[in-house]
Amino acid sequence: MISIQQEQDACLLTVKAVPGSSRTQIGGLLGDAVKINVAAAPEKGKANKELVKYLAKILDISKSSITIVAGEKDHRKVVRLANITREKLESVLAEFL
């Protein structure tokens, strides 16, 4: 089961980032987290920027609506997604899982 917490105007999503992958894509579920392979090195924030860019693209929200609120320097992250409903988030993720 995916860990999604609903806030007033945002959702919190648990992500397991796998940097250094050949391409950026959703790689499935890992426990309660969405595993996302990231085609960027885990140095100087490159992987985090690529993760934000990818989430913005697939969820059709702006990059400024996405904030890594926990785990910025860890593989396991909590990402705050503003301006999206839980229903839309679950719908989009279901397409990839």
Image: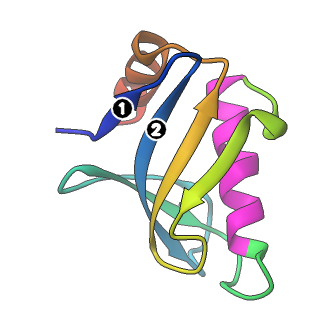
Q: Amino acid at mark 1?
A: Gln
Q: Is residue 38 left or right of residue 90?
A: right
What are the residue bounds of the magenta stretch?
47-60
x%, y% of residue 6? 40, 24
**Circle 2 residue:** 12
Query: Quick check: 56 left or right of 21?
Result: right
Mark 2 and mark 1 in contact? Answer it, CB < 8 Å.
yes
Pick the quarter of the image with the N terminus.
Answer: top left
> CA gap, disc 2 to disc 1?
5 Å
Neighbour tally class for label 1: few under 14, some 14-19, many 20 plus, Cα within 10 Å: few
Magenta-drawn stretch contains 57: yes
Could you tell me the amino acid type at mark 2? Answer: Leu
Residue shown at 38% from the left, 22% from the top: 90
Q: Where residue 32 sits in the image (x, y, percent)?
A: 22, 50
54 is higher (above) or lower (below) than 57: below
Q: Nearer the viewer, residue 20 or 71?
A: 71
Count of marks overlaid on the render:
2
The vertical placement of 94 against 57, above or below, is above
Give the residue pinned by disc 1.
5
Q: Quadrant of residue 68?
A: bottom right
Q: Quadrant of the C terminus?
A: top left
